Amino acid sequence: MTFTQKDIISIRDFSKKDILEILKLAEKMEPIARSMEICQVLEGKLLGNLFYEPSTRTRLSFEAAMQRLGGGVIGFAEAGVSSATKGENLTDTVRIVGEYTDALVIRHNMEGTARFVADEVDVPVINAGDGAGQHPTQTLLDLYTMQRILGKIDDLHVALVGDLKYGRTVHSLAYALGMFGVKMSFISPVELRMPREVLHDLSNSGIYVNETEDINEVLDYVDVLYVTRIQKERFPDPAEYAKIKGAYLINSKLLQGSKAIVMHPLPRVDEISHDVDNSPYGKYFQQAFYGVPVRMAILKKLIK
Ligand code: NCD
């Protein structure tokens, strides 16, 4: 696809070829992301960062990406400092910021918000997470991490672990891995299983998925353990969260003898022990860094 001026709302808007094109450009961006080369290709351009939900990595890596390419960033990190607190509706806010900028990044707690915003503004809109919906740019950096560390994406066996119900990163990632014909295991408490519609879509595309509660079943053969946080803020009933929290704990002892690398979109709460951080298994800090070159590639492709 031609990326210029396109919105990035769902990973399902991409083909495998589109994804590989972004990953290829991301690799070229790495020396610039590491400040070993200078690039001003987006000089004079402005990105609008509209974060209605908390964020550290996504927001800051978009900022770093834009500035590394010579562009500027405006926006807010929480709705509390925007005119939303005065009663301004979302449509008015995005219409205005869309006029000020060349592209918008939006994170919101309501599923479908990014799609709605994309219909309201002329500049490209990037979904940085819409409730329990999707998080497509996280998926691109997740795929990039697998490719950089394991040398490939095709033919891997990836286990998605934790909150598969409310976790938006795993929804996007499952669809993308499906495009690459990756074997998948979904490991979660029964209450937090992958939504039926995602399973249905995958099986319609002939994708093999194994669902279980027991992580020990897959440790011998998976290449990647993609661990996620239980999404406390999305539980309608705090008592339900209290029952499930701490369902999985990944530590060095558990991983002994496994060939798997451990990835996590972060933030982690208590699902990965700190003894994994500097072990050969722990790759989540490297993964977080890759957010910068991947988002540089996305911005370079989208902004006219
Ligand atoms: C994730 C998110 O916001 O969905 N964080 C991120 O962008 N790296 C994961 C999470 O909050 O658990």
Image (cartoon, rainbow, N blue to C red):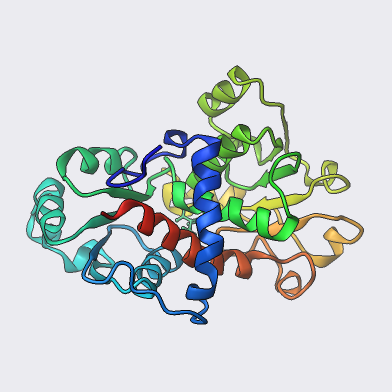
Name the residue at 49% across, 73% down. Answer: 33
Q: Does residue 175 appear left or right of residue 235 in this picture?
A: right
Residue 178 placement: quadrant? top right
Q: Quadrant of the C terminus?
A: bottom left
Picture layout, residue 196 above or below residue 187: above
Rendering coords of residue 293 (x, y %): 49, 65
Rendering coords of residue 195 (x, y %): 53, 31
Rendering coords of residue 78 (x, y %): 27, 65
Report whether residue 107 is seen: no
Judged from this view, the residue extending furthest toward the right is 257
Name the residue at 71% across, 60% down. Answer: 149
Q: Does residue 45 appear left or right of residue 128 in this picture?
A: left
Residue 263 placement: quadrant? bottom right
Label count reads 0
Q: Which one is nearer the viewer's eye here, 237 or 126?
A: 126
Q: Which one is nearer the viewer's eye here, 7 or 247?
A: 7
Picture layout, residue 149 above or below residue 239: below
Q: Quadrant of the N terminus?
A: top left
Residue 193 placement: quadrant? top right
Q: Which one is nearer the viewer's eye here, 168 or 73?
A: 73
Judged from this view, the residue extending furthest toward the bottom is 36
Name the residue at 68% across, 45% down. Answer: 153
Report whether residue 215 is seen: yes
Picture layout, residue 229 above or below residue 234: below
Rendering coords of residue 36 (x, y %): 52, 82
Q: Which one is nearer the viewer's eye here, 12 or 40?
A: 40
Name the residue at 45% across, 67% down. Answer: 57
